[in-house]
Amino acid sequence: MSKTKVAVIGLGYVGFPLLCAIAKSGKYEPIGFDLSKEKIDLIKEYKSPIKDELAEKLVKEIKYEASNEPVILKNTQIFIICVPTPVDEQFDPDYGPIISAVQTVAQYIIKGSYVVIESTVNPGTCEEIVLPLLEKLTKLKAGIDFELAHCPERINPGDPKWNVLNIPRNIGALTSKGTKYLADFYRSFIDAPINEMETIKEAEATKIIENTFRDINIAYVNELAKSFDVLGIDLVNVIKGASNKPFAFMAHYPSCGVGGHCIPVDPYYLIERAKKSGFDHKFLRSARTVNNSMPEYTVNKLLMALNERSKAMKGSTIALLGLSYKRDIGDLRESPALIIRKILQKDYLADLRVYDPYNPEQSTHKTLDEVLKNVDAVLIATDHTEFREYPNEKWANVPIIIDGKNCLDKKKLLSLGLTYRGIGR
Ligand SMILES: NC(=O)c1ccc[n+]([C@@H]2O[C@H](COP(=O)([O-])OP(=O)(O)OC[C@H]3O[C@@H](n4cnc5c(N)ncnc54)[C@H](O)[C@@H]3O)[C@@H](O)[C@H]2O)c1
């Protein structure tokens, strides 16, 4: 008996590990489709197109087919769409990649097909945008001729513990029969609970509330950081203190900004959809405003520290450490470090050096020792392990450190006589 053909559309941080997981089960005929020829060329050679430990390991153990030609999707029974859901410059949701992926798969949908959206979308996207488009293009009836579902991805790139194989999932389809069938499909290759939601909208909403929850909590501590900077209280110590409450407190930490393809993007999907229905998400908008203000706030700390030493930003030699949005990965999407780099270089005309071990092509120097030689100040925008583990004594030659991730030992550095400023400390 031939195996069920399963196609993953969009082979990035979400889609590629998923393709690997499906292939690893050995139960299906796995297919990958992506518009990027560059990615497909790598994938065809069984090389991971993303820097991800699990994907890099799995890709050596499995077999699949991949192409940037849509015809590879012919005879697919289960289509899983994992394309980006970005926002535009006005922070409005950009459904372009989802619509384009739906148009592609529509050509190959037949009676009995299943379409799953894994991309993060606002509640209503599947039924209001995807469903009518699929019905129009296929002339088939959703929920009768083919099934449509949402199974939001929760992957956390770089996480050593939680990955595509062990993160619990939620899934909701148009019909309960469809939900059950697809939940069993996910159970066949994921070793974690798969929760069957009552509706697609509820499934869509789970992911959005997870990420808005984080955005709001981070905004709260970022606002506290600004307040405690004025009050002269070390917020990091305060959060550590509050964290020993064994219930009803969850530690979040302030920093120079929120990055990545999810947290600074997803809230806008809910904000915009709710606005269309007449509800103003004031709290979410406010959280976004606070978090968006943090790169500028961090640069201001540097400006003030230089002023105290009678130096102007213009012409000062500044080392920006870290570009990626998160520790020990290279992902630059929505990274606050990129905004900081722009402000320092373009607005303040600093003599800027950059070092990120995960983004050597964007770095001006090859090593940390090299980039720190004769600088006026350092601004840490990513807490890469290399920076956190750099010996305290070696920082002593740097007059000013702005620690945008609160990742260094404040007490030790102050004892060395340099100017140290964190965010909220
Ligand atoms: N990155 C994360 O940590 C993460 C976690 C959970 C959910 N998500 C969500 O998953 C979705 C995908 O995110 P990602 O990080 O994997 O993005 P990504 O940019 O890493 O990968 C998306 C891939 O889709 C391809 N693509 C774009 N349009 C296409 C089309 N029309 N047809 C085929 N391929 C197309 C791109 O070439 C790219 O390779 C987004 O909605 C995101 O919000 C991301």
Image (spheres, rainbow, N blue to C red):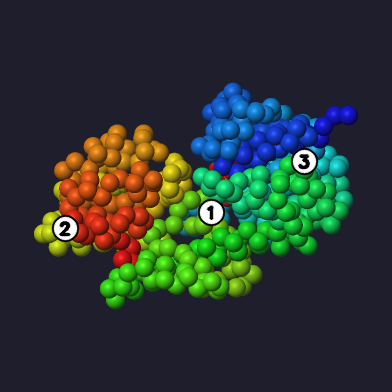
Where residue 416 appears, as percent x and y from the top left, is 18, 55
Q: Which residue is mark 1?
A: 262
Q: Which residue is mark 3?
A: 78
Where residue 42 appears, as percent x and y from the top left, is 56, 27
| Residue closest to the eye, 250 or 382 | 250
Q: Which residue is mark 2?
A: 417
Where residue 419 appears, as percent x and y from the top left, is 20, 59
Marks 2 and 1: CB-CB under 8 Å?
Answer: no
Marks 2 and 3: CB-CB under 8 Å?
Answer: no
| Mark 1 residue CB less than 8 A from any atom of ligand 1 | yes
Location of the N terminus by quadrant is top right
Label 2, label 1: how far apart the Cα atoms are: 39 Å
Residue occupying the point 73% across, 54% down: 193
**Direction bottom: furthest residue:** 231
| Residue closest to the eye, 406 or 107 | 406
Q: Is residue 186 left or right of residue 319?
A: right
Residue type for callout 3: Ile
* Ligand 1 quarter of the rendering: top right
Give the mark nearest the N terminus, 2 or 3.
Answer: 3
